[in-house]
Image (cartoon, helix red, strand yellow):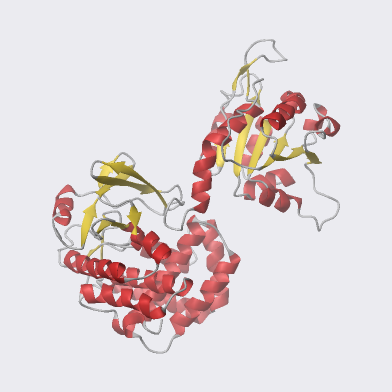
Amino acid sequence: MNAPSTSPRPGFSRLLLVATGSLAARNLPFALTLLRESRPGLSIRVVVTRSAERFVTRAALAPEAEVMVDEWPQDAAQARHVDWAEWAEVIVVYPMTLHFMGRLALGLADTPALLAAQCTRALVALAPALPPGGVESAAYQAHWSTLSARPNVVLVPPRPGISTATGRPDSWLSTLAQAIEAVDARWEEHSRQEAAPADEGTGHLVMEVTPDAGGFVWRRRPGPLAHSAFAPVDPALNGTLAGLLDGADVRLAPGEQHGEFRAYHVAGAESAARILLRDGPGEPLERLLRGVGRALRELHALPPGEITGPPRAMRRLEEWLAGRSRSATAAAAGAVLADRLGAKTWDRLRGWCAEQDADPDVVLSHGAPGLGSLAVDPDKGTGELLIGEDLCAAPWYHDLAWLAGELVEMRWLNEGDPRDWQRLIDALFDGYGRDLGEDTNRLVAMRIARHLHDISAYVGLDASLLATYAGFLDFLVNLDGGSPHARNS
């Protein structure tokens, strides 16, 4: 057995090791000793199933780690599964029997270890130990396919081994060392995704930015939980959009299809959203917002042609408000929010969505012109607004409200002089040549509600965040009268 790599690298510090009832469990004391030698600072807890105790004793494992048995405690007040799920940065199931794998893949949670693995945000590495014929079995192949779709699961391919039953090299097993190496390979990506903001590296959208000749290429694709695919690329329309605003402070940057990714060649590697959150509002961003307003006005002057609506984001919002969300976490968030807002306010939001859908006066719409999609050239101070993924036919105010709502939300969540934030909103309206008038509050409320859906669906469920947003949405939805320029939002 090879020891896990001893090369220094930043990584995880808390490991929950689950041992199931395979003969390979007899190797655990030695494997843990090697792991301790290679990673002396690692905190390890070991959970053994009752079937694993046929092959290894808790006493044999105790010198190397805290050892527990995978059963519910007599004291019902002890939520062992919650403790394990929250404590662990990494869960490794080694050795993993086909039986345990099947229960995990089917969503069963009849032991603390299974429930912790089902509910944790930690990285879960699965290292199988299979009998002869196990890899070829229909059950194993189906469970592998199911579990591989989970974003926090790492599957460790087993290697041939000598079967105790047959004496031939027809069993299949992984080692603890291989599981740790597989975790190391995924740890940086997993940590980055856990720390990513709501619109980058989530279940909704996967994005990477890399240097390119004379600039950068932004590659974006729908995330594993995305509601729907990007709008198709129209080469002729791309040519029109690319040449629409040459020399302006903000131009449109249509994307090209590169395999599963949409690729955008731009001058900057940083988005306006990142700059705003880091540096706060100021004159350079006012100029960019004015440029975005102008770019949206020029876009809206083009005929929609064959492009139709509604926007992808509106479909997500409407399904959510109607109680038909495709996301379990978003559905739970919607139920909590509906209770907090009350039926009258919830129905008012639904009615506003229906009104926008029924509006026959539509334009060629960007669909989702967020600050996270505005790439900024640090040398020239100009911007390139990525476009194409959400192209649709929608009322003119959809795009304007998207950005105004984002700015109102950011102003609400971040410190700073409200007047500085207001100047950004005013610059957007000034560039477009029109504001949202008396519809400001309802349009902003719809945008913020949609964002709360996406946070819940693609990032995670947060009860305290729901409570905070509920108060803000209640204020916006029920505010008497309108508010030009969002000054009362």
The structure residue drawn at horizontal position 59% and vertical position 68%, both measured from the top left corner, is 464
Give percent across and percent down for residue 393.
Answer: 24, 64
Q: Is residue 23 left or right of residue 151?
A: right
The structure residue drawn at horizontal position 53% and vertical position 74%, both measured from the top left corner, is 470
Rendered position, 345 above or below 61: below
Give percent across and percent down for residue 126.
Answer: 62, 34
Rendered position, 328 above or below 288: above
Classify residue 25 by image quadrant: top right
Q: Nearer the viewer, residue 328 or 19?
A: 19
Q: Is residue 114 left or right of residue 150?
A: right
Q: Nearer the viewer, residue 455 or 15?
A: 15
Q: Quadrant of the N terminus?
A: top right
The structure residue drawn at horizontal position 80% and vertical position 26%, both measured from the top left corner, is 55
Residue with the most extreme bottom position: 480
Q: Is residue 156 left or right of residue 418?
A: right
Q: Quadrant of the C terminus?
A: bottom left
Residue 263 seen by the camera: no
Rendered position, 469 above or below 68: below
